Image (tube, rainbow, N blue to C red):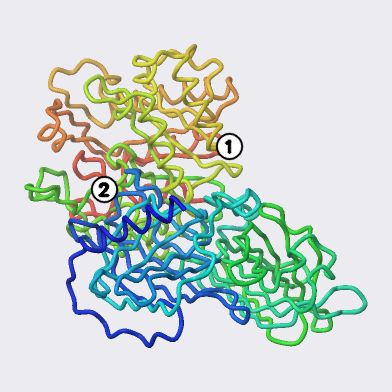
Amino acid sequence: MRSLVALLATLALACCLAPPRVAAAPAAAASANGFSGDFALLEQGSGTVVARVVARFAEPTVKRLVPGTLDIYWTSAVTTDPYWGTGAPFVAHESHGQILRAAFWGAGTAHRLSSVQGWICDHTWPQAASCHGFQMAFGTNSDGTPRKVSAFGEYGWCCDGRWYDVGAGTFSLTVATDTRGFPWGRRPAPEDRGPGPLIGPSGVLSAQARQTSAGDGFVGAFDLLASDSTHRRVGRVTARLAGPDSAHLAAGSIDITWTGSPRSTGSTWPPAKAKESHGRVLRAAYSHDPDGSVRARVEGVMCDYLGPQSGSCHGFTAELVAAADPKKADEVRFGTANACCKGPRYVAGKGTFRLTDAASAAPTGERHVGASYMTFWGIEPEGTPGLWSHPRSDTPRLGTYDSADPEIGERHIATAREHGIDLFLLDFGWITPGSDIDRAARDGLLRASNVDRIDLALLYFPDPVVSPTWGEGPARFRSDFAYMAAAYFSHPSYLRIDGRPVLVFNGLTAYWEALGVAQTNALFAEVKKKYDLYLVAGLHPDADPANLVGSPFDALMLWGNMWGSLGDDPDLTYTYAQYSTAYRGYWTRWHDLAVASGRQFVPSIYPGFDNALAVAAFGQAHTVIGRDLAEFTSLTRFARQMATDPLAMTLVFSWNDFSEGHAIEPSTGTGETYVDAVAAAFAE
């Protein structure tokens, strides 16, 4: 009861303070309890639009067990977790709720309130979502206007999360009678709490998760029959699946109406008294069997409805198999979360059962040729003219572009793939959680329509952790990795080696100096285990190999101390031949050390260097390594020989860092000569 009193008090106060920006909509006929809305969600105080909410629900009845639907489309302006009210960055693009219960009260008053409870899935990328219980409240102002506050809370306990104002759109709340039995009065039992977080490609789908494309999908409305000799009808299935892809993050839905007692299926699922089951599909993978059958494997959250205001949710997997032989029946199998599919086998009866598997355009080669990718272009910090106005070595052939534009990402991906580059590294350091550069990465490159054609990985800089002047230590390290796991590792195009997300980091020497070798190893071992990572360690050429004994790193890469490794030159100006000669020797030495210790070796190449922007922005010394296309081509071919199997990774720094003179993106100054050189070096 305390939660209800707090909810009523907070709603009353917040509702009275909410500014009425539009006239009230005409009141709906008071014949039933219900809500219908399609409106903007606003931050209180600033009025910033953080989402669009589309909801339609009513108090459930015996004839209509499912109260309704709730869909939220978030903007990039979200800065606070809406469910808990914390300042942790919230990275979901869409949230889709499965409503189990709906309550209404305030009948006969202008101050009407409603609350829904159930499970909501936050979709970050295609094939990446997390699900959890939620409760959300809606209400009208004391004068009856619909400029109301919407509030979030955890499942069964509303509402300790964020409160928002309602902006432009429709908002209609009807309360004919107060809902009986509300508040529901208990927190959910453990078995009611669903599958917990489902983030990134799971073990169930990892082998197939990158195989989806725009043409994949399933449409079905058919009788569900027992597979035994009786072929008794146990339910009716309606399902629709698509992709998912960057334009449609939610993979689809599966709805089942059970006939008779589900216990007759011989399975512990569904519950014996279940009348309906409704599944939100989070991930889908499609494949062909050797006999020509087409198979879809799906994973998500299933909610079983036993009666009005009575239901529970759990994780599930399912397989839909369209038989190639028209004489054979199409099949359906179910399983628990992360275990497909050991449940009973069903066959599809009368109705529609249409499954399509389109060919994938995802990269399939074993070699990884990567380039670091900057997302700060077009970002204009307050009071400055933007980075394009700063000194730079060249101008991209595309012109001065905005990194947050997914069409730019599409064009970059197309050009890279045409020239044999199949990996983009995003610099996490320039990128910080929730920053403009972070949002540009997530809204631009990571949402490009052809992002499935390239792999993505993060390059992690040490400065936020161990900088002598502004590093925040291990706590920042851990929080960064938690954010990277949710916002980046979960992306379906994120590079994985044996199913493990690849994290490239530089400045290992800086960690050793700040934290010591033992603590550095322990810190990286901790995140490696927690997120099941494949770690590529970036070293200075003069690092002590003894420090690597017993370390958790899977591969070694040379990074940093570049010009310091080229000899003493007072004016810090070097020829590319000096750089090439020095690094052939360094690569050979560290390649042999990596192999001897059972690790992979990753060569990294600069096409040149000129830190003109760094001099202006960071007070660094102006260093130049002159470009030489012939020498770069030769060094790139040598790098290919140094990359060890099975990782076979070579990295070029960079794709588009024109601020430090080492971009290879086609430009007005160099044309396509450098991407052509990479393509020639790695041609079969």
Residue 673 visible to the viewer: no
Residue at image coords 76%, 79%:
259
**93 to the left or right of 342:** left
Q: Quadrant of residue 108?
A: bottom left
Q: In the depicted view, which residue is nearer to us: 81 or 604? A: 81
The residue where tag 1 is placed is 645
Q: Position of residue 678 (x, y in %)?
A: 39, 47
SS label for mark 2: helix
Q: Return the residue at label 2.
A: 437
Outermost residue toward the right in this view: 229
In this view, the residue farthest toward the front is 108
Above/below status of 169 relative to 19: below
The percent coordinates of residue 209 (x first, y second) are: 58, 58
For marks 1 and 2, give the CA distance.
Answer: 34 Å
Classify residue 124 by image quadrant.
Answer: bottom left
The answer to whether any part of residue 336 appears in the image is yes
Residue type at numbered disc 1: Asp
Whether 51 is drawn above or below 229: the answer is above
Q: Is residue 528 left or right of residue 93?
A: right
| Type of the residue with mark 2 | Ile
Point out the tag, 1 or 2, that comes first from the N-terminus: 2
Horizontal side of residue 530 vs 382, given as left or right: right
* Element on which disc 1 rests: loop
Q: Is residue 469 above or below residue 67?
A: above
- Frontmost residue, 21 versus 590: 21
Residue 623, how many percent across, how many down? 17, 28
Using the rendered view, name the quadrant where residue 657 is placed. Answer: top left
Q: Residue at x 41, y 22 (%)?
A: 585
| Residue 425: x %, y % from top left | 38, 44
Please report contact status of discs 1 and 2: CB closer than 8 Å, yes or no: no
